[in-house]
Image (cartoon, grey):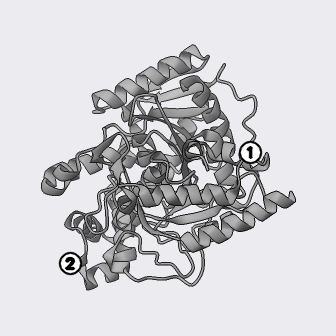
Amino acid sequence: MSKQWLTMSMGDLGRGIGAGDIDPLDLTRTFLEAIGAHGFRDRIYARLTEGRALAEAEAASKRAAAGHRLGLLDGVPISWKDLFDTAGVATEAGSALLKGRVPDDDAEVLKNATRQGLVCLGKTHMSELAFSGLGLNPVTATSPCVNNHDAVSGGSSSGGATSVAFGLAAGAVGSDTGGSVRIPAAWNDLVGLKTTEGRVSSRGVVPLAARFDTVGPLCRTVEDAALMLAVLEGGKAADLKGAGLKGTRLLVLENGLEGARGEPVAGFESAIGRLMDGGALVRRAKLPMVDDALAMSGVLFTTEAYATWQDRIEAQPDLMFSEILERFRAGGQFSGVEYVQAWQRLDQIRLDYHRAVAGYDAVVMPTSPIMPPNIDRLISDHDYYVEENLWTLRNTRIGNLMGSCSLSLPTGLPSTGIMLMGAPMVEERLLRLGAAVETVLA
């Protein structure tokens, strides 16, 4: 067994299995032992699925020995955010409201991953009902940032990101409604892919706001993100060979730089400089319709979230962290007329926005305009919590509002990311661009 396996990419692990250098059963045991020995184990994993993992790994080992692997990632162990249904195993979405909820069937994406031979290590902690970008959860557990253990790791896919960043999973599956894959990816120096709404199945996924909910991977490399997307939707991975930056047109969205703090801006601008040196053509602009869309976030996100959870919440509101409860209840202040009008307005804004950026290969900005906030202060200081939560999601939420696919990559400065946004349903093109960006930034 090798500790080196804990920090390898999924693609490299898969190639090692294919070459006969790595046995899937040994690999899974190595991850399970690392999890068991880790001081943050209970702050990252809500529960392990050790029996399932070992059985799946043994089957993968036999397939590898017989030369009948199901795909490149057959035998690679990953974690799952605790809102993906897992048959016979509690799926509680980080909330005491769902304590003891045990589904009878796997989520569709988990079924797809299992069919491709991926090993399910367990379920990871998350923000309560996925309704915060911070990753703070006093109800269950708060995962620490890999670069600052006194700070949050980003949410809501907090445990998923940290399971990879701390070497306790080769990859993770999360969800992104307003930034919940990209924020923890950026703050923990990972790659995070937000897919287009509706592209990847959400069947068997505990919802937050279904019109914005998306499923996506958190991993070490762009190749891993491409491989995982293919696994999750049962398709073919994007071809990343030969991807280059020369002649690529990028639009720096200045809306995402306004109010951004020093370190995220420094990481972003350093990355932009290197991309320009690599041949990218960069223009900067502020688009007013983006601010118009952001101003409607309250009615669009919170109304649907509260409508989805109102009955369950109001039956036992004392079970919730007060900050999350307040945020849900904010959705009750809007009328149906306001909600419908906001969506009608957003539909027009989306058309205007995609028309304005159609000549660019991607729109880019810092993934988050702030650094990971302090855990203790978030718990004790209401105003700080509200402000930091809003700032955390400001940039990523643009991608959800515009219906874009989006990719976050590390800039090289710890806990800062550069976010690439593409048109809806062009994930393969975005991943090719991401591979070129990754090569330059690495």
Q: Is residue 130 above or below residue 420?
A: below
> In the rendering, at what x and y percent does residue 26 appear?
64, 57
Instruction: Please name the amino acid that badge 1 sits on.
Output: Arg
> In the rendering, at what x and y percent does residue 298 appear?
31, 58
What label sits on residue 151 in the rendered view? none
> Is residue 410 found left or right of 297 in the rendered image?
right
> Is residue 23 found left or right of 377 in the rendered image?
right
Instruction: Please name the amino acid that badge 2 sits on.
Output: Asp
Q: Is residue 320 above or below residue 17?
A: below
Which label's residue is closer to the chain start, 2 or 1? Answer: 1
Q: Quadrant of the C terminus?
A: top right
User: What residue is at 39 percent from the left and 33 percent from the top?
Assistant: 414
Residue at which label 1 appears: 15
Q: Nearer the viewer, residue 212 or 373?
A: 373
For label 2, count other residues whose C-alpha is less than 10 Å away and answer few (under 14), some (14-19) or many (20+): few
The single residue placed furthest to the top in the displayed view is 277
The single residue placed furthest to the front in the displayed view is 1
Residues marked 2 and 1 touching at CB (< 8 Å): no
Q: Nearer the viewer, mark 2 or mark 1?
A: 1
Q: Is residue 35 above or below residue 357?
A: below
Marks counted in the figure total 2
What label sits on residue 318 in the rendered view? 2
User: What residue is at 28 percent from the left and 50 percent from the top?
Assistant: 389
The answer to whether one can see residue 215 in this image is: no
Q: Nearer the viewer, residue 132 or 304?
A: 132
User: What residue is at 44 percent from the left and 61 percent from the top?
Assistant: 36
> Is residue 260 found left or right of 215 in the rendered image?
left
